[in-house]
Amino acid sequence: IGFNNVRIDLMYRFPDQTLDRLKDDLENFIQLDPDGISTYSLEIEGLPFMKKIPELPSDKLDKEMFYYIGEFLTKNGYIRYAQPDFSKPGKEDKYVLNSWKAPQQLMLGFGAGAHTHYFGGHIYVNVCSVKRYIEAIEDGYFPVILGQSLTKEDLMAKYMVLGVRCLYIDKIKFKKYFGIEILRKFNKQINELLKKGWLKDIGNYYEIADIGLWYIDNISKTFYSKANINERQPRGKKLSNYNNITLYKRIRAKGV
């Protein structure tokens, strides 16, 4: 049909779901022979309708399902290249690798609600309204509503926060990009993770250990910068708060 990389998302941990039902789902997925599979455990905590949803499987079963998925897909020829993502060799999702794998790459976002990462030392978020997005373009404005300037501290944190989700952290590239040994910056955090057994030191890389896969969010948050440690993500600033950027002020004045 013209697509050379077909992927499937699998959500599990539905109410009343058992491990056997998950196994059936995986068997059915394999029959479709997708190039990649991304897996997500259902979370509804904090949502307004959560009281209407039957009780979800326990954390114990959730963890059992998580590790079974990894074992099953690996046995069937898939490689885990990020915590939730598996693919056939050479079929990894380029978006995941570009946006998560350290060092993260420049990404330009086009369209309503799109994110642009690290362009000119900033992160930008476009307006979500399609109507306002089009109006801004037609009026000659950038359709940007949210942004954040990235300091060296921010970039080092992002190298780790996102990088661990792709399971490996390159020590050599960290020094190349930031001019400092990784342990000089994150000695406390890394040693803590090594002691817990969540992280492994394998020469020029740190690797997420098998036991650490389950705690990937905890590992990621370990490296949050001081400015972001208690903030919900993504975090940004209204561009009207930026000084000496008249174009952004014009955008704000247009009500975009």
Image (tube, grey):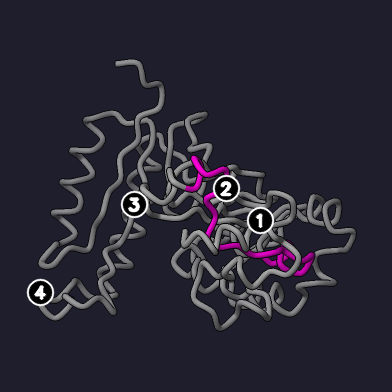
- Which residue is disc 2 drawn over? 141
Disc number placed over residue 247 in the picture, else none: 1
Say which of 209 and 2 sits in front: 2
Kindly identify the amino acid type of the residue bearing the numbered disc 2: Tyr
Residue contact between numbered discs 1 and 2, judged by CB atoms under 8 Å: yes
Residue 39: mark in rendering: 3
Compute the Cα span from label 1 to label 2: 7 Å
Question: Dividing the image into 4 quarters, which one contains the N terminus?
Answer: top left
Query: Under tag 4, what secondary structure?
Result: loop
Q: Judge left or right: residue 18 versus residue 70.
A: left
Instruction: Give the amino acid at mark 4.
Output: Pro
The magenta-colored residue range is 136-157
Circle 3 SS class: strand
Image coords of residue 160 (percent x, y): 66, 62
Question: Does the magenta portion include 97?
Answer: no
Q: Residue furthest toward the top? A: 2
Residue 137 to residue 197: above or below: above
Q: Earlier in the sequence, mark 1 or mark 2?
A: 2
- C-alpha distance separating marks 4 and 1: 50 Å
x then y, percent, for residue 100:
58, 51
Q: Nearer the viewer, residue 46 or 250?
A: 250
Evaluate if marks 3 and 4 touch, with contact meaning CB atoms under 8 Å apart. Answer: no
Residue at image mark 4: 54
Query: Which quadrant of the view contains residue 122?
Result: bottom right
Q: Residues within 10 Å of mark 2 (few under 14, many from 20)?
A: some
Is 217 situated above or below 176? below
